[in-house]
Image (cartoon, coloured by chain):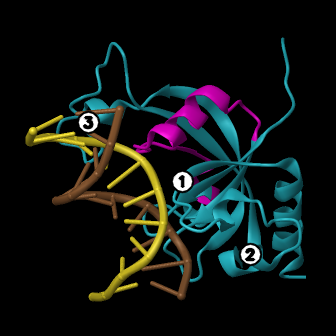
Chain colours: A cyan, B yellow, C brown
DNA sequence: GCCAACGTTGGC
DNA sequence: GCCAACGTTGGC
């Protein structure tokens, strides 16, 4: 099997919709409902099983990285886009040529405390991280290995 | 709840 | 293909 270096991502979710605790309970979850082309492209074209994911809680108190997950299944068509009554329904998505894709995500670790966005902004080495850029609204974004490791360290040291 | 920043839509 | 209007995201 052809292999490639493990890549790293950040995925946002509002805790009210789905939290790291929900993920810990479920073990694996589906990541449906992404309706942004750039985020879709990332999921569909770049995510591979085993890639690392920073689980980011948006619209939270505080917002920040709540833990770690990994890609459990590579992209497949988002079935909710075809369900008329569903809030993720998109009449323009053709089942024979789906517009929207989703991946599955597996729980890896919950940080003792959330790493707030403010801490990410202050941390050394994270100045170029997508999520700290002003006006960054992408719900699925790439993270470098270096950034991933720094955030991991921040998350683990909190409760110590 | 406010509002700035951004993506998408649609008229032309 | 431009760009104004609109809807959404998401920090605060």
* Residue wearing tag 2: A121
**Rendered residue at 67%/30% (across/down):** A46
* Both marks 3 and 1 on one chain: yes
For disc 2, the neighbor class at 10 Å (few under 14, some 14 to 19, many from 20) is some
For disc 3, the neighbor class at 10 Å (few under 14, some 14 to 19, many from 20) is some
Q: Which mark is residue A158?
A: none
Disc 2/disc 3 C-alpha distance (Å): 36 Å
The stretch of residues the image draws in magenta is A24-51
Which of the two marks, 3 or 1, is nearer to us in this view? 1
Disc 3/disc 1 C-alpha distance (Å): 20 Å
Q: Is residue A139 above or below residue B12?
A: below
Of callouts 2 and 3, which one flags the residue occurring earlier in the amino acid sequence?
Answer: 3
Element under disc 3: loop
**Rendered residue at 37%/22% (across/down):** A98
**Rendered residue at 79%/79% (across/down):** A122
Residue A15 seen in the current view:
no
Q: Chain of mark 1?
A: A
Disc 2/disc 1 C-alpha distance (Å): 17 Å
Q: Chain of mark 2?
A: A
* Residue wearing tag 3: A90
Q: Is residue A35 magenta?
A: yes
* Residue wearing tag 1: A138
* Both marks 2 and 1 on one chain: yes
Which of the two marks, 2 or 3, is nearer to us in this view? 2
Of callouts 3 and 1, which one flags the residue occurring earlier in the amino acid sequence?
Answer: 3
Q: Position of residue A60 (x, y in %)?
A: 52, 77
Residue A91, picture quadrant: top left
């Amino acid at each position: 099997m052809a292999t490639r270096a493990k890549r790293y991502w950040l995925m946002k979710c509002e805790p009210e919709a789905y939290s790291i605790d929900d993920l810990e309970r479920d073990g694996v979850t589906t990541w449906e409902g992404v309706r942004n082309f750039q985020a879709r492209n990332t999921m569909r074209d770049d995510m591979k099983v085993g890639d690392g994911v920073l689980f980011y809680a948006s619209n939270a108190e505080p917002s920040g990285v709540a833990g770690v997950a990994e890609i459990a299944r590579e992209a497949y068509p988002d079935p909710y886009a075809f369900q008329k009554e569903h809030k993720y329904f998109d009449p323009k998505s053709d089942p024979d040529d789906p517009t929207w894709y989703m991946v599955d995500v597996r729980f890896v670790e919950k940080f003792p405390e959330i790493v707030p966005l403010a801490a990410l902004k202050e941390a050394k080495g994270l100045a170029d991280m997508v999520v700290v850029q002003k006006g960054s609204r992408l719900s699925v974004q790439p993270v470098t290995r270096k950034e991933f490791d720094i955030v991991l360290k921040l998350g683990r040291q909190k409760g110590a």
